[in-house]
Image (spheres, helix red, strand yellow):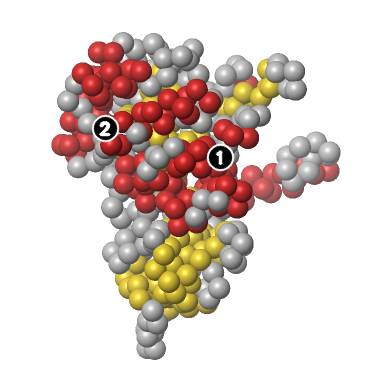
């Protein structure tokens, strides 16, 4: 009998779920074998198949595993000094959020959080069971890379699929010139072409008044196609969201893309990912041009009621699907449309044909949802990470971390780690 790590059967038959591929396919059976979707049809006969785990999914929805295109998996530089450096992500932070593919990035701090560590973290998470890529670089320009060149990083390092997050229109940006931004995009394009990768530039948009201006100039003054730019944090403020609508609707939207951030803390409910998605759709932006990412583990400045800085929070990957739920429940976005922003659309802009869709031959990254859209089960590469609302796989040291918290309880700490 054959086993994958965790002792689960290699083959799984998920029976009778309503499949959203993300387009609705109706009730189907899905056969998972060797980490891929081997068969997809109504009623798969399974008599005689050895080592098969059958899952009754009637009454549930099956969607592709979620893709989060912007996560500080290594932790971020705290913007309130050394003690505020944010922690590394844990495997279960991703899997309990339904995320089976993640792109790790560096942000403000490209010094104490460096690419060698990011690459090692990516490889570690992948060994634990999810799919991980990284962007080379950080906020900084000139871009710090592993090999000394964006092109070489893309060609020589399997995990590198783009460059970012390059900060523009932000007080923390390196204030790159037009020529510098154009050169980064050119290197991403050529490196991507030569390595068969997307070669995207993930751009951190700040609150500055120049907004998307530098990207617009590169698109109008060079031959670089729009598909290489993924401007993110577009829901940071109303002005940037409006500028995003103008940007995305130019040139018949060809290749133009907007990424919304689900961890942004704002008092304006109209700027939540869910509300901003509804606004963009009403303004005529194509659903296929919009994605969500969480900015998980990034540092989030917190402000008190008087608007004064009061400390830092940490971005949460769990907000990614929460905002999709909210778009459906509170903003009337149809489910099969809303789920694209964390499945097929990021798979397309990241150039990952085996991800973000339920189809034969695709990786068996799947999320099973209850009728009320709560996560019931998560499979990553054919392996149950979550099943029946229970965590089935922990990262290497997660049990030790939990035991450590238990040990501290006599000293007045609750399971959350907070003093009670
Ligand atoms: Zn950012």
Query: Quarter of the image containing the C terminus?
Result: top right
Seen at 57% across and 22% down, the residue is: 78
Q: Residues within 10 Å of mark 2 (few under 14, many from 20)?
A: few
Q: Earlier in the sequence, mark 2 or mark 1?
A: 2
What residue does disc 2 label? Answer: 251
Q: How crowded is mark 1: few (under 14 residues within 10 Å), some or many (20 or more)?
A: many
- Residue 382 at x, y percent in the picture: 41, 64
**In this view of the protein, can residue 50 be seen by the observer?**
no
What residue does disc 1 label? Answer: 275
Seen at 70% across and 18% down, the residue is: 307
- Residue 262 at x, y percent in the picture: 54, 38
Seen at 36% across and 46% down, the residue is: 288
* Image vertical order of residue 302 relative to residue 334, above or below: above
Local secondary structure at mark 1: helix
- Residue 343 at x, y percent in the picture: 41, 51
* Image vertical order of residue 23 relative to residue 273, above or below: below
109 or 336, which is in the foreground? Answer: 336
Give the mark count. Answer: 2
């Amino acid at each position: 009998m054959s086993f994958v790590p965790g002792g689960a059967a290699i083959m799984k038959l998920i029976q009778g779920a309503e499949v959203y591929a993300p387009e609705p396919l109706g009730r189907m059976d899905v056969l998972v074998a060797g980490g891929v979707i081997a068969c997809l049809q109504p009623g798969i006969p399974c008599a005689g198949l050895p080592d098969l785990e059958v899952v009754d999914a009637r009454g549930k929805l099956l969607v592709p595993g979620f893709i989060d295109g912007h996560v500080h998996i290594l932790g971020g530089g705290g913007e309130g000094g050394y003690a505020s450096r944010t922690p590394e992500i844990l495997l279960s932070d991703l899997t309990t959020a339904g995320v089976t593919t993640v792109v790790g990035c560096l942000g403000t701090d490209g010094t104490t959080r460096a690419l060698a560590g990011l690459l090692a973290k990516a490889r570690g998470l992948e060994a634990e069971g999810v799919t991980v890529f990284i962007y080379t670089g950080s906020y900084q320009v000139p871009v710090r890379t592993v090999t000394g060149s964006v092109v070489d990083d893309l060609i020589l390092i399997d995990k590198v699929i783009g460059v970012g997050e390059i900060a523009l229109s932000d007080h923390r940006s390196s204030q790159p010139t037009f020529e510098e931004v154009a050169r980064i995009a050119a290197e991403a394009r050529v490196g991507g072409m030569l390595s068969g990768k997307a070669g995207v530039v993930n751009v951190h948009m700040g609150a500055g008044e120049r907004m998307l201006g530098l990207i617009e100039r590169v698109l109008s003054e060079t031959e670089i196609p729009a598909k290489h730019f993924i401007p993110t944090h577009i829901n940071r403020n109303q002005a940037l969201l409006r500028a995003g609508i103008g940007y995305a609707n130019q040139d018949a939207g060809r290749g133009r893309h907007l990424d919304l951030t689900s961890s942004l803390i704002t008092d304006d409910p109209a700027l939540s990912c869910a509300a901003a998605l509804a606004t963009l759709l009403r303004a005529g932006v194509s659903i296929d041009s919009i994605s969500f990412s969480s900015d998980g583990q990034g540092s989030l400045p917190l402000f008190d009621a008087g608007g004064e800085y009061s400390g830092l929070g940490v971005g949460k990957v769990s907000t990614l699907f929460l905002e999709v739920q909210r778009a459906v429940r509170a903003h009337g976005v149809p489910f099969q449309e809303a789920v694209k922003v964390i499945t097929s659309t990021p798979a397309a802009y990241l150039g990952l044909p085996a991800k973000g869709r339920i189809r034969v031959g695709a990786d068996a990254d799947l999320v099973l949802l209850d009728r009320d859209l709560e996560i019931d089960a998560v499979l990553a590469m054919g392996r149950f990470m979550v099943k029946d609302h229970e965590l089935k796989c922990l990262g290497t040291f997660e049990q030790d971390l939990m035991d450590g918290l238990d040990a501290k309880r006599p000293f007045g700490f609750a399971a959350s780690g907070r003093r009670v």
